[in-house]
Amino acid sequence: MHSFLLAHEVPIRLGFFFGSLLFMALWEVISPRRALTTAKGTRWFANLGLIAIDTLAVRLLIPLQAVGMALYAANHGWGILNGILLPQWFKITLGVLGLDFVIYLQHAMFHAIPLFWRFHRVHHTDLDFDVTTGVRFHPVEIFLSMGIKMTAVVLLGASAAAVILFEVLLNATSMFNHGNVRLPGRIDGVLRLFVVTPEMHRVHHSVVIREHNSNFGFNLPWWDRLFGTYRPQPAAGHEGMTIGLSRFRDSLALTFPRLLILPFTAKTIP
């Protein structure tokens, strides 16, 4: 598995990205959960524009990235998992779980620390909630996240295969749990025991502060339950809740170029 993932990393990543995006976009058309409140074309241009800038910037400015750091750490025997004897499949599993826990902690930290919130709130200014919200992140947040991830890879000793699997899963589940799709209650109740569902993560995008400071998980739902940050439903219900941040309600001020400069022009309050 390790050699296969390394040899086919780029097509695997691209295939899962575009496959997940297309699948969720079609699902949203067939069975939407909520009516959109703003122009879809403008939002999609802004959200997809951000992911394009993010990807290009990371590729150009951080050529090593998390996979390269995993290989470097393995060659030098750095990290917990590189220092113990375990079956390879078990190391990969622990690596994925460990990285997911780090991302949960990072997400909570980005809400709690004003400097980090300044950039992360770009994600929360989306006035609607759909598949493209899952890729709406400011480039500076992506750089901060990459630095945290690379540090975690070294400390954990996560293998390159674990990193690739984690990033592919995180990307796909982020688009899934941001989907504006309708799931039967019973199916959602079972799924959210194993993965963050749209019904669970939508609460995190509520305009109500106590609600957007909950449900920090992107991939696995267990950390929120374990650390008391789980909130099953929004107080106003999924049809009645308001998406976004109370201070940013003008869609004309949330265009692609304005999102890029937003962290530098507004105070760090919700």
Image (cartoon, grey):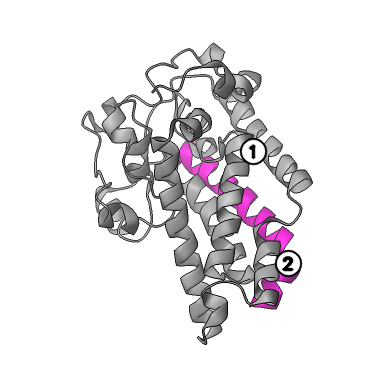
The secondary structure that dominates the magenta segment is: helix
| Residue, disc 1 | 51
Q: Position of residue 150 (x, y in %)?
A: 61, 57
| Residue, disc 2 | 8
Q: Position of residue 263 (x, y in %)?
A: 55, 24
Q: Can you say which quadrant of the picture contains the N terminus?
A: bottom right
Magenta span: 1-30
Q: Residues within 10 Å of mark 2 (few under 14, many from 20)?
A: few
Distance from disc 2 to disc 1, alpha carbons, whole Å, reads: 22 Å
Q: Position of residue 164 (x, y in %)?
A: 62, 63
Q: Amino acid at mark 1?
A: Ile
The residue sitting at 56% across, 46% down in the picture is 145
Depth order, front residue of 83/210: 83
Give the mark nearest the N terminus, 2 or 1: 2
In the current view of this chain or complex, which residue is farthest to the left? 235
Is label 1 in a helix, a strand or a loop? helix
The residue sitting at 41% across, 41% down in the picture is 181
Q: Amino acid at mark 2?
A: His
